């Protein structure tokens, strides 16, 4: 049986938020450089698709997966 990723809901006060900002807000990385490294390694997915752009704009309803964490924007 496959293990489900933990889900964390982040409530946005303003839209959009960039992927790099979200990764820092969620505590996944401490710096933009850390986000850039994860993205370059193909470890981040947005709505199920590998994403490499730190500046990708995200909106409520989207999901980001990194490692064993799934982040849902609300």
Image (cartoon, rainbow, N blue to C red):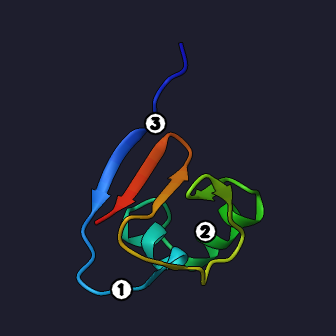
Q: Earlier in the sequence, mark 2 or mark 1?
A: 1
Residue 13 lies in what quarter of the image? bottom left
Image height of 41 relative to 15, above or below: above
Q: Is residue 38 left or right of residue 67?
A: right
Indicate the secondary structure of the residue bearing disc 2: helix
Residue 54 screen position, x and y as percent: 62, 78
Local packing at callout 2 (Cα closer than 10 Å; few below 14, some 14-19, many 20+) is some
Indicate the secondary structure of the residue bearing disc 3: loop
Question: Which one is nearer the viewer's eye here, 69 or 56?
Answer: 56
Point 45% across, 45% down: residue: 69
Q: Earlier in the sequence, mark 2 or mark 3?
A: 3
- Mark 2 vs mark 3, foreground winner is 3
- Mark 3 vs mark 1, foreground winner is 1
Point 29% across, 87% down: residue: 14
Residue 10 screen position, x and y as percent: 29, 63
Q: Is residue 7 left or right of residue 67?
A: left
Local packing at callout 1 (Cα closer than 10 Å; few below 14, some 14-19, many 20+) is few
Give the numbered dot on residue 34.
Answer: 2
Point 67% across, 53% down: residue: 43
Q: How much space separates mark 2 and mark 3, taking CA atoms?
A: 21 Å
Q: How much space separates mark 2 and mark 1, taking CA atoms?
A: 23 Å
Give the numbered dot on residue 5.
Answer: 3
Q: Is residue 53 left or right of residue 32?
A: right
Q: Earlier in the sequence, mark 3 or mark 1?
A: 3
Please give the residue where the numbered disc 1 appears in the rendered image.
15
Pointer 2 with pointer 3, Cβ within 8 A: no
Residue 11 lies in what quarter of the image? bottom left
């Amino acid at each position: 049986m496959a293990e489900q990723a933990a889900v964390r809901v982040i409530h946005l006060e303003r839209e959009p938020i960039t992927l790099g900002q979200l990764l820092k807000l969620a505590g996944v990385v401490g710096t933009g450089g850390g986000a850039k490294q994860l993205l370059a390694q193909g470890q981040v997915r947005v709505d199920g698709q590998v994403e490499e752009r730190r500046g990708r704009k995200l909106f409520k309803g989207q999901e980001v997966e990194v490692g064993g964490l799934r982040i849902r924007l609300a």
